[in-house]
Image: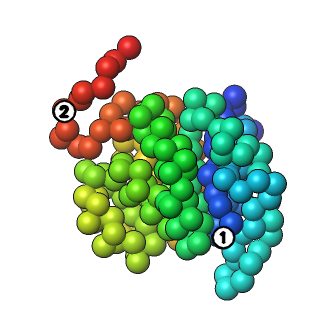
Amino acid sequence: MAQPLQGKRVAILVENGFEQSELMEPRRALEQAGAEASVVSPTAGRVKGWRAADWGEEVPVDVPLDRASPDQFDALLLPGGVINPDKLRMNPEAVAFVHGFFDADKPVAAICHGPWTLIDAGVVRGRRLTSWPSLKRDLQNAGAEWVDEAVVVDRGLVSSRKPDDLPDFNRKMIEEFAEGRHPRQARPAGATETRATH
């Protein structure tokens, strides 16, 4: 079986209340593709998922957020769930962690309510993406072009709307993560490049 992500490390940033299927299924797909997928969280020990209308399973935290850096990872996954991204976007350390992947031109995948955290990280302006429908206005107000599609890819940013989109989301996520760094990931479309190049 081909493993296009062999040797790559992926951070899965979550808080309590993540949508269970949006962590479990992408993590399984990443691991089957050869990646090392690590749960990163501000909460120590374990974090609890949300399944349908009630709390779901707990998963171990592999790397506490205060010991994590984007430099340790090749890509970032942001599962949804309403509670999870709402907590993350209020955490400056989590927001800075997310922003670091864009600064380093590393690919990012976000599903459902996951893009909420991208708004607070200041990385959606000029980007084309999708999300759970209730985020449409928030994303538009932050300068994004919101579309109602199963999966959208824009310069290394993969987004989907809901758990039903997971097959398409997982496929595109693996493709983009396999490609690696995406130049101009941190820069809005049409913006002038100001960061130093090495």
Instruction: Name which quarter of the figure residue 35 lies in.
Output: top right
24 over 178 or under it: above or below: below
Residue 163 locus on image (x, y percent): 58, 70
Q: Residue furthest bottom?
A: 53
> From this viewpoint, which residue is outermost toward the top?
198
| In the image: residue 181, left or right of residue 4 | left
Nearer the observer, 36 or 5: 36
Q: Nearer the viewer, residue 87 or 165?
A: 87
Q: Mark 1 points at which residue?
A: 17
Give the quadrant of the N terminus: top right
Q: Residue 192 carries which label?
A: 2
Residue in the image at 26% along x and 43% along y: 188
Give the number of the disc on residue 151.
Answer: none
Task: Give the vertical position of 6 relative to 165 (above or below).
Answer: above
Q: Quadrant of the C terminus?
A: top left
The three-letter amino acid code for the residue at tag 1 is Gly
Q: How far apart are marks 1 and 2 (CA)?
A: 38 Å
Left or right: where does residue 194 sit relative to residue 65?
A: left
Q: Say few, some or many: other residues with alpha carbon within 10 Å of mark 1 (under 14 / 14 to 19 / 20 or more).
A: many
- Which quadrant would residue 184 be assigned to in this image? top left
Q: Could you tell whether 182 is left or right of 184 in the image?
A: right
Q: Is residue 142 visible?
A: yes
For the rendered model, the colour scheme is rainbow
Along the line of sight, the residue nearer the viewer: 72 or 1: 72
* Depicted 54 relative to depicted 171: above or below: below
Q: Which of marks 1 and 2 is nearer the N terminus?
A: 1
> Where, by quadrant of the figure, is residue 57 drawn?
bottom right
Decide if residue 80 is in sight here: no
